[in-house]
Amino acid sequence: MKNHNLKNDDQVASGGGPPYDNNMEARVAKIESELMAIKIDLAVIKANGATKADIAELRADTKTALSEAKTTIILWVVSAIFLAQLLPTLLKSLGL
């Protein structure tokens, strides 16, 4: 294990070698620029991504549409059965 000349756990090594080299400002600047890119990416995700509210609204709209579709199907089936029962009697009474 490499010794970094640490006096205690709270101090930084004075040896000048990695990871405590004199290039710390350049490394911090790079981290800051990458953090800016992350912030921009996060803003894009927030602007274009679906929120919980968006998903809840979509779910409610889907439930409403599904309910309306079920009602329409039931209405058509009941009408078809009613006409299937009524039509032969109607045709007989008309003599067809």
Image: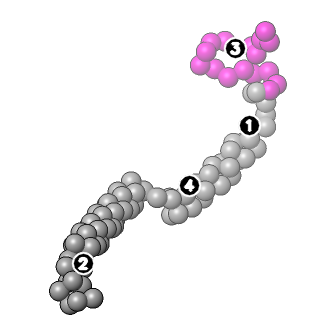
Q: Which mark is residue 24?
A: 1
Q: Which mark is residue 88?
A: 2
* Type of amino acid under label 3: Leu
* Type of amino acid under label 2: Pro
Q: Residue at x 66, y 12 (%)?
A: 7
Q: CA distance from mark 3 to mark 4?
A: 38 Å
Residue 54 vs residue 68, the one in the foreground: 68
Q: Residue at x 79, y 37 (%)?
A: 23
Q: Quadrant of the N terminus?
A: top right
* CB under 8 Å between discs 3 and 4: no
Q: Residue at x 72, y 47 (%)?
A: 30
Q: Which residue is mark 4?
A: 42
Which residue range is magenta in the image? Answer: 1-18
Left or right: 30 in relation to 56:
right
* CB under 8 Å between discs 2 and 3: no
Q: Earlier in the sequence, mark 4 or mark 2?
A: 4
Q: Which residue is mark 3?
A: 6
In the rendered view, tell whether residue 15 sits above or below residue 36: above
